[in-house]
Amino acid sequence: MLSGLAHAQTAPAPTAPVPIPQAVTVPAVPVQQVRTIRSLRVEGSQRVEPETVLSYTRLRTGDTYTNETVDQAIKDLLASELLAEVEIAGVETGDLVIRIRENPVINRVIYEGNKRLKQDKIGKEVKLAPRQIFTRTAVRADVARIIELYRRQGRFAAHVEPKMVSLDQNRVDVIFEINEGPKSKVRQINIIGNEVFSDGKLRGEMATKTSSLMNILSSNTSYDQDRLAYDQQKLRQFYLTEGYADFRVISAVAELTPDKRDFIITYVVEEGPRYKFGPVTVDSAIRDFDDKRLATALAIKEGQWYNAKAVEDTVEQLSETAGAFGYAFADVRPEFQRDREALTMTMNFHIGESNRTYIERIEITGNRQTQDKVIRREFRVAEGDAFNTFLVKRSQDRINSLGYFQDKFEVERKEGSAPDRIVLAANVEERPNGELTLSAGFSSLERFILQASIRQRNFRGMGQTVSASVDYSSYSKSVELGFTEPYLFDTNIALGGTLFRQDYNAFNYIGSDRSTTYSQVATGGQLVAGLPLTEYWTLSGRYTLRQDNVTLDESSFYTNGQCDPLKAGRYYCEAVGNRITSLVGVSLIYDSLNSRLRPTRGQRMSIGADFAGLGGEVKYARARFEGSKYWNVGSGFIFSVSGEGGYIHSLEKKKAGIDPVRITDRFYLGEPQFRGFDIRGVGPRVQRIQLTGDPLAPGGSTQAMVTGDDNVVDDALGGKAYYLTKAELEIPLGAGAAEMGLRPSIFVMAGSLFGITRPGKTIDFEQAKDASGNLLFNKDGSPTLLPKQQLDASNNPLFIATGGANAGAATPCSVGYGTTPANCVGTSINTPYTTPAFYERFVGDSAKPRLSVGFGVNWNSPFGPLRIDIAKTLVTVDGDDDKLVTFNVGTQF
């Protein structure tokens, strides 16, 4: 770096960096008697004028001087911080010459070794800068500032060595060589004086954690002085919630180890006695309130252990109660009376006199695009109404659920023009509501995905939603257009419509190979209308008209132009066809969630029924239920439980061995909604297991089942009934992780899919018998099955021709070739046309709950929403397909 600097200048090369001297030597002045200054001049000045130099001294021509006068002049000049060296000559003769060397000018300030703190952050704190005068005092001050910056980061071992490089024209480069050192961790936390609670329990209440393998991912293991004060407050809060009202932290000392790498923190505490609540009363100056009834409704009771948090919650409860009756500015003050002998805390909640409050006006600011009416129609109160805390809170939740504005929006309360007037201020901060997505991704469900979509959730600022999307993957394709008007003609009626075309390929797995079974193309549209019945209840109706065309690959599943059950399975052959579904449905919805996008409290429930049969070829009735509830359990933890279920019943006549509900209309369960299971991994299915060996081999059958995944065809059939429940706890992370959109959670899930008619066998294989007519069994106990000879349309046994021009063709002739047994021509002996025996099992049709547990992470990654789940199945049923890890990226979940 320094050689590069020398090359950039035409002057002589700079010297090597040298440590900045810490002191300047002042020449001694010989002791002599009082003399008179005959002349006075300055030598060595370049930038500083001689008059400026003389102005810093008391030396003047004609004045007398002594040794002390000369010494003081030198000190004054050095104190000006303009000069690096000062010497006064001619003291003996009275012709004084002040020889000076000016402090250099700073050319550059360079930082070396700084990795944790960037140069721009350090540069904001230091005072030295290019074109300023270099002084030792400024350098020492800047070194102290840099070290303080590192200490704020917990790096108490940081060391800064200042150096300078001399350049021409009395300029210097200042170099700060920084050794950042490791972060100073908290090695140990000692607590002295605690008897009731263990050290481990109290450390668990603190934000600061000790450096250990258990806390390797924690960012709170470094020492922070502010966190030390916060931990003292946390300790006090904990003891106050446990009834120890006299608790205090006597001292908190943080000691740095000699190597400056670790801290040892020691707290000395005094717990004091534990208190219980004494009599709990309410004293209200508001005449509308009954003091005794209010006191009876309080959560805290006499005889309970004292809890400061419960007192705060009670104050909030009484304030909310007063607000619900229109007293927006009710003053609720808890009054304590401590009895140190009885160890009780008598509580009286005083509600000060207050006027009933009315809403003077509702102010809406910050909305540049969104029309005022879109926000105002979500308010549950209007100007002139009596203030109501509950309705204002509900208004706030409804605005949050729109998703148009900043997170955690709150309605602010301001004093109005009179004591009984209040102003509600909705200061919104609009977020972008238009979404244009062009993405490619990969998921364990869809493989490679291409997606293009555009959606505007606040179209024209009127709260309307318009959308268009195109999705393409190896196994599904779709195009969809949609529009929703939430307030039709400014009435409280929502109306929306969707046009769609969906091309879906069903599949099964043979080992790790995914094989397409049937293709379903759906084309249609849907109209949905919603009518609020009350604040929380909504009635929704819908009408769907769709055409489903189900096909099978003829080259893979057809024989002689007909769907072959031996290749496809009779259940898939029965689904082939083109059908129109005309469906009308209705749902009753209860919704009290505080946000529809990311709820943290409240509940939602939906009960729906659909009827297909108003025209079209498909006739069935279907009922579904969904419900969820969320709790904010404190400290950022969100706990939720959810459940759903459904049942579908055909209105068509039943046929033997055929379920009247078509395979395309049934429910399916698995990835992604049931974590821990593969796609369609739960519920009824038919498995075909290959057989090897000769069933009639001399000495006994060698037939055996090949049960490896690569040899089993597994076809999911769906179910007519299902249920699924989930309990999940979302775990908060630090602020940095929250900004990245990381939201981990743990969960447990239970569910099942069941209820279809047992499908008839695709083919019945004859069980082998011995010479005495006894049934034969294989070594594993399974029946020995013989190959099935194929029949023609007239039920004649079929053979494979072995000779002539028709060799390899199917024929009813055992000898020669012909189209009927009566016209066989030829002498070649044919081989029977047989289907190799296989086992066909119907499994999984059980209402028994399947159970899985696991953890997952949601991440708003740069590539799109990402969800990763690791789930372990604990309870399964024969035939279920589990899956440990699932993920999706580049598509919505």
Image (spheres, grey):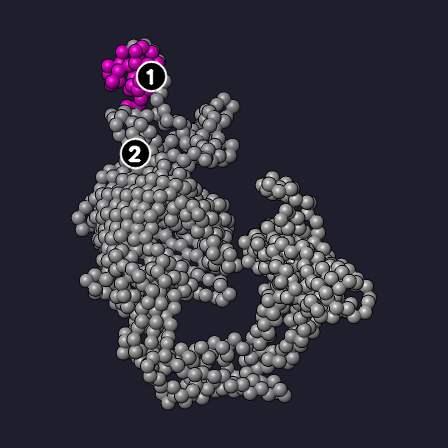
Instruction: Residue 407: give x, y in percent of width and height.
Output: 40, 62
Height in image: 540 above or below 240? above
**Residue at the extreme left:** 615
Q: Which residues are magenta?
A: 796-825
Q: CA distance from mark 2 to mark 1?
A: 26 Å
Image depth: mark 2 or mark 1 in front: 2
Residue 643 as seen in the image, left or right of residue 550: right
Residue at numbered disc 1: 808
Tell me the element at label 2.
Answer: strand
Residue sitting nearer the eye, 855 or 878: 855
Is residue 736 highlighted in magenta?
Answer: no
Is residue 815 highlighted in magenta?
Answer: yes
Tell me the element at label 1.
Answer: loop
Residue shown at 67%/55% (left/top)?
44
Residue 862 as seen in the image, left or right of residue 201: left
Residue shown at 51%/86% (left/top)?
335
Height in image: 805 above or below 184? above
Q: Amino acid at mark 1?
A: Gly
Q: Is residue 641 visible in the rendered structure shown here?
A: yes
Q: Which mark is residue 552?
A: 2
Instruction: Residue 348: give x, y in percent of width and height.
Output: 49, 86
Q: Main secondary structure of the magenta part?
A: loop
Instruction: Residue 285: give x, y in percent of width and height.
Output: 41, 89
Residue shown at 62%/63% (left/top)?
52
Residue sitting nearer the eye, 410 or 868: 410
Give the crowd class for mark 2: few <14, some 14-19, many >=20 residues within 10 Å: many
Residue 150 as seen in the image, left or right of residue 612: right
Could you tell me if the residues under marks 2 and 1 are in contact, i.e. CB atoms within 8 Å?
no
